[in-house]
Image: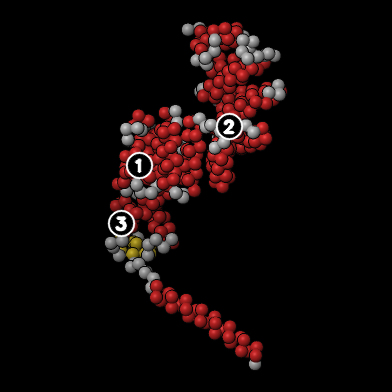
Amino acid sequence: MDTVTRAESFLESLSLTEQQIKEVCSVLPDSVKDSSETRIVESLVETQLEGSNTVTTMNAPRFNKFLRQLLTHYCDLDTTKESKHALCEKAVQWARDRKSVNLRHELELTLMSLYYSTYHYKQAETVASALYSETKKLQDKEKTVKACLCLSQVYHAMGNISKARANITTAKTEALKIYTPPDMQGELDLQSGIMQVAEGKDMETAYSYFKEAATGFTSRKQRARALKYMLLSKIMVNRAEDGEKAVRSQSHIEDIDEGVEAMLAIASAANRSSLAEFRKTREQYEEHLVGDMVVASVLDDLYTTMMEKNLLNIVLPYERLQIDHIAGRINLPREEIERRISQMILDKRINAQLDHRDDCLYVYASEDSDVVYQKGIDILSQLDKTVSHLNRKVKKLL
């Protein structure tokens, strides 16, 4: 298949007419006829940007859409992020030079999403903030919502939870004033649930948001992502079984992908309180667990909770245990066990003492506080303050 045929096939997928396809292909340089799809798309964008006029067979709105489609497709291709940044930035500057405000805003949406997906958070913040200010003045609600949504995602990635929360709230408020397509509503619901997880507040609310997103997205990939977070929110409140039932229901079974399978394996490990299975799963599905900032942010806390639960079950029935015995029972390195037990002792989660002279852990009876005794102490303390105050007054009178 020659290059022109490949180009025509690609352009047909963008719903161009036969006449438009012929005109666009006619400006394709001969030097790229045998090149890859990446080079073809890049060349198509560059020829459109370098030309003094747009495609004559397209009106302005159709040409703007065509250019956005080319850039969006190019960002999805397997090429370097530097090349993607350079081409998108060039397109934005081209639209700015032509004083085409609406097109520039559309291209900036693509650019800010590209920056975010390639972890260039500062650049994404700069573009999204400027876009928000401009679209707010122009009363362009749809672009305002998208800019706020991107800002929320960026601030969450940067660890600024308060700003992330403020921006998703603004995005949802603005979205109420316009028609919100299913995918955009899904993104809003997904980000709202992510903020609940990040704040560690109400996991039931987070679950509701993720469930709405899982049924709202038109993309199977996005529905699967929402399912993964649905299960995560249930695992965090020790209700992994409920999450598994929801994920494996008839309405979601076709959306299960490798990422959801990874979370199901974590749920299984949590149900069995198996740290070894948890560690194995995290290593096996590293891309879907450690590589996902939403999941990775709570995995360590979940692992710590499971470890402490296992340690308490092992040590509480005894008064004295060898540290090596505990490590063997829980199947973890001794150094890790010592660090966790030391932290539990400092946090007063267990009344015990580590003795390295005989490499043992001594467990003592829990120190239950006597409520009556504590109230008596408080009353005597207040009485002492009153007597001292009266004593000072008497001295002044004398």
Residue identified by numbered label 2: 142
Label 1: element kind: helix
Label 3: element kind: helix
Name the N-terminal-most of marks 1 and 2: 2
Name the N-terminal-most of marks 1 and 3: 1
Q: Is residue 354 above or below residue 308?
A: below
> How far apart in space, not on screen, are marks 2 and 3 (Cα)?
54 Å
* Residue reaching furthest to the bottom: 398
Q: Which residue occupies the foreground of this view, 280 or 385? A: 385
Mark 1 neighbour class, 10 Å CA radius: few under 14, some 14 to 19, many 20 or more: many
Q: Which residue occupies the foreground of this view, 356 or 149? A: 149
> How far apart in space, not on screen, are marks 1 and 2 (Cα)?
33 Å
Mark 3 neighbour class, 10 Å CA radius: few under 14, some 14 to 19, many 20 or more: few
Location of residue 182 in the rendering, given as x and y in whole percent from the top left corner: 48, 31
Name the N-terminal-most of marks 2 and 3: 2
Q: Quadrant of residue 68?
A: top right
> How far apart in space, not on screen, are marks 1 and 3 (Cα)?
25 Å
Residue identified by numbered label 3: 313
Residue 127 in view here: no
Q: What amino acid type is highlighted by mark number 3?
A: Asn
Q: Quadrant of residue 46?
A: top right
Label ID, residue 89? none
Q: Marks 2 and 3: which is nearer the front?
A: 2
Q: Marks 1 and 2: which is nearer the front?
A: 2
All told, the count of numbered labels is 3
Residue identified by numbered label 1: 243
Q: What amino acid type is highlighted by mark number 1?
A: Gly
Residue at horizontal 55 percent and vertical 23 percent from the top: 72
